[in-house]
Image (cartoon, rainbow, N blue to C red):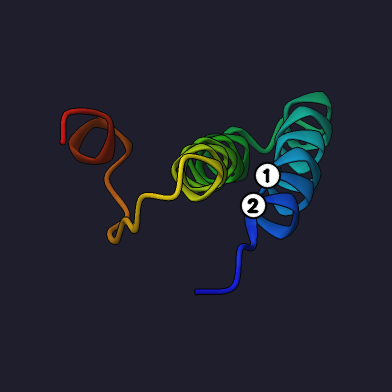
Amino acid sequence: MVSREKDWLRQALKDLEHAKKSIEMGDFEWACFAAQQAAEKAVKALFQKLGIEIWGHSVSRMLNM
């Protein structure tokens, strides 16, 4: 399996930056969406780093596995 943790983490950081900019512009719905995406991708990066294959979009479910 190819490890993509750096790709996941890089995209998570971009999503987090997008969330911050959305807050500044008052686009709170997009800020929430981008923040959730950032969290999801950061969790996937962590699991990839640990060598654990993980699927899904629910951050809480992934962290409780």
**How far apart, in angstroms, are the residues tagged by discs 1 and 2?**
10 Å
Residue 55 in which image quadrant: bottom left
- For label 2, the residue is 5
Q: Position of residue 2 (x, y in %)?
A: 59, 73
Q: State the residue in front, 8 or 33.
A: 8
Amino acid type, mark 2: Glu
Q: Position of residue 57 (x, y in %)?
A: 32, 54
Q: Residues within 10 Å of mark 2 (few under 14, many from 20)?
A: many
Q: Position of residue 18 (x, y in %)?
A: 78, 42
Residue plotted at (74% across, 51% down): 6
Mark 1: which secondary structure? helix
- For label 1, the residue is 12
Mark 2: which secondary structure? helix
Q: Position of residue 32 (x, y in %)?
A: 52, 35
Contact? badges 1 and 2 (CB < 8 Å): no
Residue plotted at (73% across, 53% down): 11
Task: Count the numbered circles shown.
Answer: 2
Residue plotted at (34% across, 58% down): 53
Amino acid type, mark 1: Ala
